[in-house]
Image (cartoon, rainbow, N blue to C red):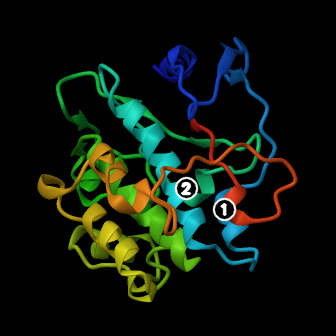
Amino acid sequence: MFVRFPSLLKSLNHERIIKCYHYWVDSESKILNMITELFSSGSLKKYIHNGVGVDLVSIKNWGRQILQGLCFLHSQSPKIIHRDIKCDNVFVASDGKQFGLAVCIMDGDFVKEKEPKCTPEFMAPECYNGEYNELVDAYSFGMCLLEMVTGEYPYMECRNQMHTFKKVYTGVKPVSLGNVKDYRVRDIIEKCILPMSVRPSAEELLKDPFFLYNGGSSTFETCAPVDNILTSHAMNIRHLYLV
């Protein structure tokens, strides 16, 4: 069952998905080995916490590229859910990658799981019930966007994971949401953390005017891979890495 994920990864072909060339399981150690595209850049979390500051154009570009990858995953049959979208799992720059856990929906429109393997601060409330669909990625994206904008980990005010669980499950929003000054970004985050029944999909989020245009430009702007990054908006999120 564990080997299914790299097998799935190897079959995917998209500019936001890392290429997996080969994989095998060591018969003695039972360790999974994978040969993928080389990536050596730091994470988005490391970048936004280095004190440089992140501009709005960067937020638009990074958010757009993450959503593009999610739209591709969710368009597969059966659908693929990333389940662990967060800044720790976003790698930027010319050979930057995004990686994380993924699960394939094998039966109908919902995953049924006794113990969800996600990061609590980025986990949608329905995950705690053990039954969810691809909209959990939209929720996690909202929390990821929140960290991009504020530089703060969601629910930092919580004392422990149980405290986080109680707040998430009862719909209490993270304190850091109050630090989001741009009303457009806050509106998107608010939509992402709505109940599953009314939460927008990654495809719907990608159509939001905020991600369609950069600054005052009326044209769609795409980031190109850049070496020796000097400004944050030039950095490019290239891949979703599923392991």
Determine which residue is flagged by label 2.
61
Query: Does 108 sit left or right of 90 as displayed?
Result: left
Residue 76: image location, x then y, percent: 35, 23
Residue 50 located left or right of residue 4 = right
- Figure check: 140 above or below 241: below
| Residue drawn at (55%, 56%) of the image | 61
Q: Which type of secondary structure does the marked residue at label 1 adopt? A: helix
What kind of element bears circle 2?
A: helix
Location of residue 108 with respect to 70 vertically, above or below: above
Among numbered discs 2 and 1, the one appearing first in the sequence: 2
Give the quarter of the image for residue 185: bottom left
Percent coordinates x, y for residue 47 in the rendering: 72, 65
Q: Residue under circle 1?
A: 233
* Label 1: how many Cα within 10 Å (few below 14, some 14–19, many 20+): some
Residue projecting furthest to the front: 218
Quadrant into which the C terminus falls: top right
Which amino acid type is marked by label 1? Answer: His
Instruction: Answer whether labels 2 and 1 touch (C-beta < 8 Å).
Output: yes
Give the amino acid at mark 2.
Asn
Label 2, label 1: how far apart the Cα atoms are: 7 Å
Q: Position of residue 4 (x, y in %)?
A: 48, 18
Q: Quadrant of residue 115?
A: top left
Q: Label 2: how many residues lie within 10 Å, few (<14), some (14-19) or many (20+)?
A: many
- Number of labels in the image equals 2
Q: Is residue 136 above or below residue 157?
A: above
Is 232 left or right of 40, judged from the image as shown?
left
Where residue 102 sits: x, y (%)? 46, 35
